Image: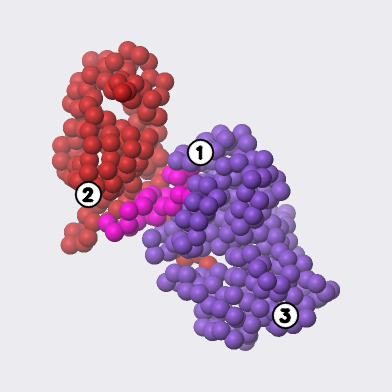
Amino acid sequence: MSNNVHDPMVPQIYEVTKRIRETHDSFSLYLESKSNSVISNFGPGQFNMIYAFGVGEVPISISGQVEKFGHLIHTIRNVGTVTSALNALKKGHKLGLRGPFGSSWPIEKCKKQDVVLIAGGIGLAPLRPAIYALLKERDQFGEIAVLYGARHPTDLLFTKEFENWRGKYGVQVKVTVDTADREWKGNVGVVTTLVPRVSFDPNNTIAMICGPEIMMKFSVLSLKQSGMSEENIFITMERNMKCAIGFCGHCQFGPAFVCKDGPVFSYNNIKPFFETRDF
Amino acid sequence: MKSLQSIIENHPFFKGLEPRFLELVTGCASNVRFEAGQPIFRQGDEANQFYLIRQGKVALEVCPPNCEPIVVQTTSDGEILGWAWIVPPYHYHCDAIATELTRAIQFDGQCLRKKCQEDHSLGYTMLSRLLPVIGQTMEATQLQLTDVYGNRS
């Protein structure tokens, strides 16, 4: 939420205070507001529209917690014209930012329950604020499992944080990659193979999934095989978002707008459209 | 110390196995351990063994010509290793190497095959437990082939 009433279509100016190279093709931008109207709070899973001046705007999920008033972290994969322009930004450079938009991960619903978070590739970035929120009130939740899959060991994000999550907070963190060479001593295989390897009570668990749609589809199947019911599974959708406030219709998904009604959905609510080919 | 039969009975692959089948399969089993880096079998070898992993991790590798080996799957605690012992022509399809100290129950594939031939109920039971594992491996391979993480923003 913005502090002041602000036109949601007008970007606010943010300055890059730090840039971290996360992997060979992804990076994090630490941003600080340079205007009076700042984002002081957001829900885990929400996104901002980030504008590279003169190039274009892209929806990017918030990937870190707000540590200081008016500060934000976004983790971005360099895959197109706008993200390439954002990748070129250095400390002190400015960008435009609108948001936060969309729905959040159901953290309140997770209280007194086990929580399974499944991430694929860059999908760990939108889930990280949810992980931080869970860890902040660790004693409110049962088992927490983070299952993370990527294409290759060099594609893994935030690996330095895993030991802290495991050691300090007792989180079951399991990581796997699709292929690797012999230097990699971890798991190899798709992320769904990790589901039977963690302990949780399927009758008392909330699952959150973020990744490519095909990965989410197989993850849902795997969770259902473990005994979980669909209403306790949440996924985040990605579509071509433009206005981010449900006006333009670019991100329409069945009866919903991903930007306004999502990007986090209860699987139960979007199942008919999620399972429809070419939708 | 746990008996071999009790270890087999409590392994997820054989959970709930009828006592008479349990006795039959235990007759083909022995305890084994592999050090980190130790090869377990090679692609093309006769598939005369089948393993229940008790503890540890095994990498399954394929070796494309003139390339370094690529790890395509790992298998660990509570899972199985090798299904080619029951499918003619009984040859392994990839290399298996322990990536850490691995303790397992090894079954003599020929012994198991003979018992499955003699008692088709045991054969059906073995196949009905193996097929879901093979099916899951196939599904996982399909997902790996789609390279889902490749082009997503």
**Residue A128 drawn above or below residue A39:** above
**Circle 1 sits on which residue?**
A199
Residue ID for mark 2: B37
Q: Colour of chain B?
A: red
Q: Please state which amino acid type lies under the numbered disc 1.
A: Ser
Chain letter, purple in picture: A
Camera-side residue of A165 and A174: A165
Asked if residue A80 lies in the magenta stretch, the reply is no
Q: Work out whether A72 lies above or below A156.
A: below
Chain that bears disc 1:
A
The amino acid pointed to by label 2 is: Gly
Q: Is residue B82 left or right of residue A87?
A: left
Residue at 15% x, 37% y is B46
Q: Position of residue A129 (x, y in %)?
A: 62, 60
Q: Chain letter of disc 3?
A: A
Q: Is residue A191 magenta?
A: yes
Return the x and y of residue A6 as percentages of the image width and height: 81, 75
Q: Residues within 10 Å of mark 3 (few under 14, many from 20)?
A: many
Q: Which mark is residue A12?
A: 3
- Which comes sooner in the sequence, label 1 or label 3? 3
Figure quadrant of the N terminus of chain B? top left
State whether residue B143 appears in this view.
no
The answer to whether A61 appears left or right of A98 in the picture is left
Front residue of A24/B148: it is: A24
In whole angstroms, how far apart are the C-alphas of marks 2 and 1? 29 Å
Q: Nearer the viewer, mark 2 or mark 3?
A: 2
Quarter assignment of residue B150? bottom left
Q: Which residues are magenta?
A: A173-195
